[in-house]
Amino acid sequence: MGIMKPQVIGSESLEALSNAAADFLVRRAMEIVRAVGRFTLALSGGSTPQRLYEILARKPLKDRMPWQESFFFWGDERFVPADHPESNFRLAYRAMLSKVPVPESNIHPVGTGTGSAHEAAENYERDLQKFFGVNNKPRFDLVLLGLGADGHTASLFPGDPVLNERRHLAAAVRAPAQYAVKDRVTLTLPVLNSAACVLFLAAGREKKKMTDIILNQPQKAFRLYPAARIRPEDGELFWFTDREAH
Ligand code: 6PG
């Protein structure tokens, strides 16, 4: 399939965007489970996806989503306890996973109970290798990503050496000064770009400038902003935006 141009799906509001993304996700999950028997996702954190998670956990989509055959990982995690308000696991668990019939063993959080973000990244990498096969590069059926106004995505921040990581699947990083939680674990670009499908969710006025640069000046953006480096080698890239963001 090669590197495909991003497909932009514009919605009026965050609510409409969340419904459109939820419909897309469930349809894709049903297709893939029918075809190969399982559906693998990497969830995003921050605030944008919360409404999407809530919609997936409510009728009618709750009854259509193949929860038993869906396997949940995270694109990144803050190195805080799983019950910490800043935890991306906690966000998805409270909004969705705790309300749906997904087997506990299908949920693969970044373990943050260890001594350091580095150890957490190593353990997460081992979990990914165990799940996808140690000799295979993980290929998620669907990766959800958000966009930082500074152009970061997952926990890949501008100028971070982790952007050059080609071997490891996950890495410990330090977020820039303005972020409350600095210690993070993130999937690396090779994993994100091996996904079969990536959905960016970008909503709100503060994302407009960055969304426009990434979508309209991809070469310039590629040099400056990690979110512009998300170009699935052999997969689809969708940007779900609301009117304020694009
Ligand atoms: C995180 C997210 C991060 C997020 C963007 C957008 O751990 O913070 O993975 O990449 O998607 O920062 O965050 P908002 O959705 O809160 O704007």
Image (cartoon, rainbow, N blue to C red):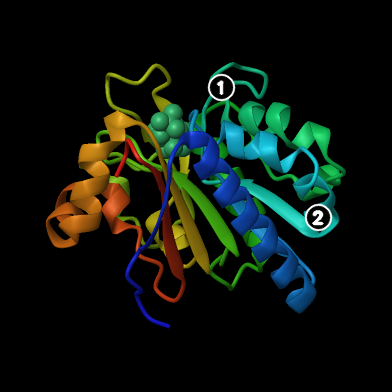
Please provide percent x and percent y for residue 4: 35, 74
Instruction: Please say whether residue 158 is visible from this viewpoint.
Output: no
The CA distance from mark 1 to mark 2 is 33 Å
Placement of 58 over or under 180, stated as above or below:
below
Q: Residue furthest front?
A: 12
Residue at screen point 62% across, 61% down: 129
Place residue 51 in its image quadrant: top right
Left-right relation of 24 to 178:
right
Please provide percent x and percent y for residue 145: 46, 47
Task: State the residue in front, 166 or 94.
Answer: 94
Instruction: Please say whether residue 123 is visible from this viewpoint.
Output: yes
Q: Quadrant of ligand 1?
A: top left
Indicate yes or no: mark 2 CB to ligand 1 under 8 Å.
no
Q: Element type at marker 2?
A: helix
Report crowding for label 1: few under 14, some 14 to 19, many 20 or more residues within 10 A (C-alpha).
many
Q: Element type at marker 1?
A: loop
Residue at screen point 77% across, 54% down: 65
Three-letter code for the amino acid on which mark 2 is drawn: Arg
Q: Looking at the image, is mark 1 or mark 2 earlier in the sequence?
A: 2
Marker count (numbered): 2
> In what quadrant of the picture does the N terminus appear?
bottom left
Residue at screen point 66% across, 24% down: 82
Disc 1 versus disc 2: nearer the observer: 2
Please provide percent x and percent y for residue 113: 65, 26
> In this figure, which residue is indicated by the disc labeled 2?
64
Task: State the residue in front, 86 or 185.
Answer: 86
The label on residue 80 is 1
Three-letter code for the amino acid on which mark 1 is drawn: Val
